Image: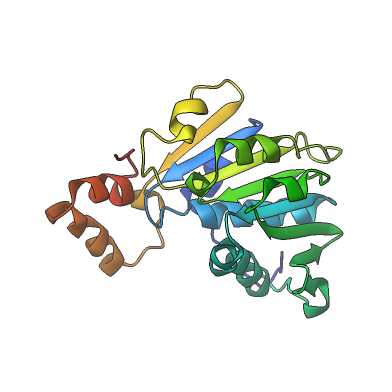
Amino acid sequence: MSKKTDIKVGRVFKRLINADATVVVNVGGARSGKSYATAQLLIMRALNSSVSIAVTRKTMPALKMTSYRLIIELLKTYGLYKSAAHNKTENYYILNGSRFQFFSLDDAEKIKSSEFNYIWMEEATEFSYNDYLVLLTRLSAPAAQGKNQLFLTLNPTDANCWIARNLLSRAEVQVIESSYKDNPFLAQEYIKTLLSLKDYDANAYNVFALGKWGQ
């Protein structure tokens, strides 16, 4: 990363960088820093060696508004962005020989011939269990840094979703839990907004403020 840029990382990043499981479920409340930390980690991995990275969300409009945009903005902030390396038609970015491929997963069949070192499922509750299984089988690129990994980021909106029921207790899965308290960069006004949820919606308060599983 650029030597002129002061890179700030939160508590979630410090946990994430030490996660060594094949599947890492990063579950937390609103603005806990989970997506930001995942984007930072993937940029770091891309700089360390030549790797293939997939960044996906269920639909492309949602992806472009969130993790796609976040990674590009971070690259610009860190002085790493070059317009010639960004193919906006095919939605990929080349960084230090590494490739970020951004795609939606409206049809899981279309990526069955692909292979990646790292995959990020943003807002993972939008995906189906079958989508997850297909993506898991795409961690087939030759490992460049230890092991290939699949990262899921999500708000804990439904304790009965497939992630809570099928993944959290598995040996190959590591869970990182977080809340707004893990993000030291949040404005106090936003924290007040989160805490105010307690006054009119207990479930929303548990999910988005405390990072606890909701119904």
Residue 86 visible in the shown view:
yes
Count up the numbered dots.
0
Q: Quadrant of residue 76?
A: bottom right
**Residue nearer the viewer, 58 or 141:** 58
| Image location of residue 123, percent across then percent down | 50, 51
Residue at the bottom extreme?
Answer: 83
**Residue nearer the viewer, 148 or 11:** 148
* Residue 60 position (above or below residue 144): below
* Residue 163 position (above or below residue 53): above
| Image location of residue 20, percent across then percent down | 65, 32
- Residue ID at (50%, 33%): 175
* Residue 125 position (above or below residue 87): above
**Residue nearer the viewer, 104 or 180:** 104
- Residue ID at (36%, 44%): 157
* Residue 104 position (above or below residue 134): below
* Left/right of residue 146 with respect to residue 212 in the rendered view: right
Q: Quadrant of residue 135?
A: top right
| Image location of residue 45, percent across then percent down | 73, 50
How is this picture coloured?
rainbow
- Quadrant occupied by the N terminus: bottom right
Residue 17 visible in the shown view:
no
| Image location of residue 51, percent across then percent down | 81, 50
- Quadrant occupied by the C terminus: top left
- Residue ID at (57%, 68%): 61
* Left/right of residue 116 with respect to residue 30 in the rendered view: right
- Residue ID at (36%, 40%): 158
